[in-house]
Image (cartoon, rainbow, N blue to C red):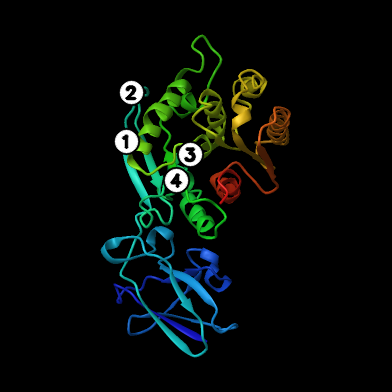
Amino acid sequence: MVEIVLYVPDPHSWDSVFLSGDTPELGRWLSIGARCTRFSDGTHRLFLPVERPGERLRFLATRGHWRDAEVGEWGREARPREIELYPDSRIEHRVEGWGRASIRYHIDFASEFLPHPHTVTVYLPPGYDLEPERRYPVFYLHDGQNLFDAHTSYVGYPWGCDEIAERAIRLGEVEPLIIVGIANSPDRLKEYGPRRSAVPDGAARDYGRFLAEEVVPFINGTYRTRFALDSTGVGGSSMGGLISLHLCKWYPNLFGRCAALSPSLWWDQEAFANAIQSGSRWTKNCRVWLDMGANEGGSEAGRQGMLRRARELSQQLSYLGTDHRYYEDPQGSHNESSWGARFADVLRFLFPA
C-alpha cells in the first residue's frame, strides 16, 4: 500500500476532502473520486494498493466540487501532482488553499435591444490560468440559471455543466472550452419563440442581436476566445433548443456548432421544420446535436408527437447533408436532470479533443 497524506490549510475543519485523479481508484477525474480519512492531527489520508510498482498517477485534492478544488500559491490554479507508486511508501502533499475561480458572474448584463437584463455566467476550463497564451472555443447556452448552480436552477437541480465539462476535459475527451450561460428573463417565451407575424420573429430577433452584437463581443473582449466558425457554438433545451436552431440559421457566419436538446419543434405550428429548406445555407457549415427523450410530452399522443417531429427534423438534416447526430434517450424526460445526463455526449460530439 501507499499512503498519501494531505496537509490542508484548515486542519480543524470537518469538511470532506477527496482525491481526484486519472486512475479508476481516484474516480477518473470525478471531483469526488476517493474520499480521504481525516486523522486527529488534522491531516487527511488515503491508502492505495500498489499493483504495478513504479506506476505513475496524477491527482488533485477537492472538497467535492471542481470549483472547490485545491489552488496553488496566491490562489492560482494548481497543476495536478504526479507521483510514482511503490509499496510501503508515504507521499506527503500540502494543499495551499481551496477554490479555483472557474465560474465568473456578470450580473444583470444590460442590452440596448431588450428591456430586461440577463445574468451571464462564464465557466473557464482547467488550464486557463496555466496557459496564458492559449485561446479557447466558446459554447453559448440559454437558460443559464439552470446550468451551474442549484440555488438558481429550476426545482434546485442544475445540469452540472462545469462538473461535466471539467471531467471530460481532464479525461482528454473534449477540447478545453469556455461555456457561457445566458440566464432567461420574464420575456423568455418571446425571446426564445420566433413567430410568423406582421413583425416577423419579434423579440426573438432582438434576443439574437443581444447575443450576437452584445454578449459575443463582450466575451471575446474579456476572455481568451478563439475566433472561428467551428469554435463558436450555441445550444439549449426545450425553447432554448428551438432558438438555438434559429440563431444558427440567422447567423451562419457566427455559429458553427449547435445543440438542440428536446427542442420545442411544435412551436408556431412547426414553423422551423416547415421552413428549413429555405435559407438552408447554415446547414452546410454547422455541426448539429439533436435529441429527444422517450418520456417527453404530457400524454402518449404528446410523447409520440415530440419524437415524430425530432425524427423528421433529423431526416431533413440528413437530406441537406448536415453534419449532425440524432439521439433518442430511452430514459429521458423534459427536465434538467435528463439534459445534464446527455451533456457530456453533446460536448464530445460538438467539441471533441
Crowdedness of circle 3 by 10 Å Cα count: few (<14), some, many (20+)? many
User: Does the residue at mark 3 contact the one at mark 4 (Cβ under 8 Å)?
Assistant: no
User: Does the residue at mark 2 contact the one at mark 1 (Cβ under 8 Å)?
Assistant: no
Q: Residue furthest left?
A: 74
Please tell me whether mark 2 or mark 1 is closer to you in this view: 2
Is residue 340 found left or right of 117 in the rendered image? right
Residue under label 4, please give it.
136
User: How far from the left and from the top, in percent, is residue 302?
Assistant: 69, 33
Residue under label 3, please give it.
141
Secondary structure of residue under mark 1: strand
User: Does the residue at mark 1 contact the one at mark 3 (Cβ under 8 Å)?
Assistant: no
User: How far from the left and from the top, in percent, is residue 50?
Assistant: 56, 84
Crowdedness of circle 4 by 10 Å Cα count: few (<14), some, many (20+)? many
Q: Residue furthest top?
A: 198
Mark 3 vs mark 4, CA separation in Å? 16 Å
Crowdedness of circle 1 by 10 Å Cα count: few (<14), some, many (20+)? few
Secondary structure of residue under mark 4: loop
Residue shown at the point (28%, 66%) measured from the top left: 73
Residue under label 1, please give it.
108
Is residue 299 found left or right of 142 in the rendered image? right
Amino acid type at circle 1 is Asp
Residue under label 2, please give it.
112
User: Does the residue at mark 3 contact the one at mark 2 (Cβ under 8 Å)?
Assistant: no
